Amino acid sequence: MRYEYEQLVAEPMKLNPFDRSADGLATAVTQLPPELVVALQQAAVEIDIDAAQQTIHQIAHHNPDLAEILAELVEHYRFDHLQKILTP
């Protein structure tokens, strides 16, 4: 008899419509590599759209749903919301 075990792979945290709240987004941000969070925080403080978009592009590799929401915030110049989400 031989057992085969399914290997579990961590998947990005999926966001449902209720997770678009600041708390839900802040929770999703904690799953990101710290260097991406720091880079996005810096871009938000400096209101640097290009840096924010570049960082969000990298975030998309880790969590596409979160990246899409963050991109919407940047597109609508909601850096105040972005800072709230990124501040622990």
Image (cartoon, rainbow, N blue to C red):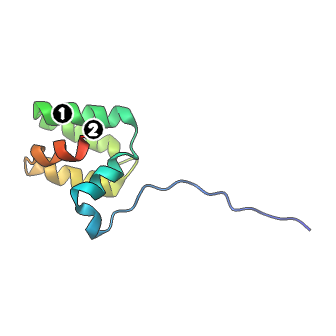
Q: In which quarter of the image is residue 39?
A: top left
Residue 43 marker: 1
Q: Where is residue 48 in the image (x, y as percent from the top left)?
A: 12, 33
Residue furthest to the right: 1
Q: Which of marks 1 and 2 is nearer the N terminus?
A: 1
Residue tagged by mark 2? 55
Query: Which residue is at 66% across, 57% downward?
Result: 7
Query: Residue 5 at what x, y percent from top left?
Result: 74, 61
For this view, does 76 lie left or right of residue 66? left
Q: Is residue 77 above or below residue 1?
A: above
Q: In this view, does 44 lie above or below 15?
A: above
Q: How crowded is mark 2: few (under 14 residues within 10 Å), some or many (20 or more)?
A: many
Q: In this view, does 79 lie above or below 34?
A: below
User: In the rendered structure, are the residues bearing label 1 and label 2 in contact, judged by CB atoms less than 8 Å apart?
Assistant: yes
Residue shown at 18%/33% (left/top)? 43
Residue type, mark 2 in image? Thr
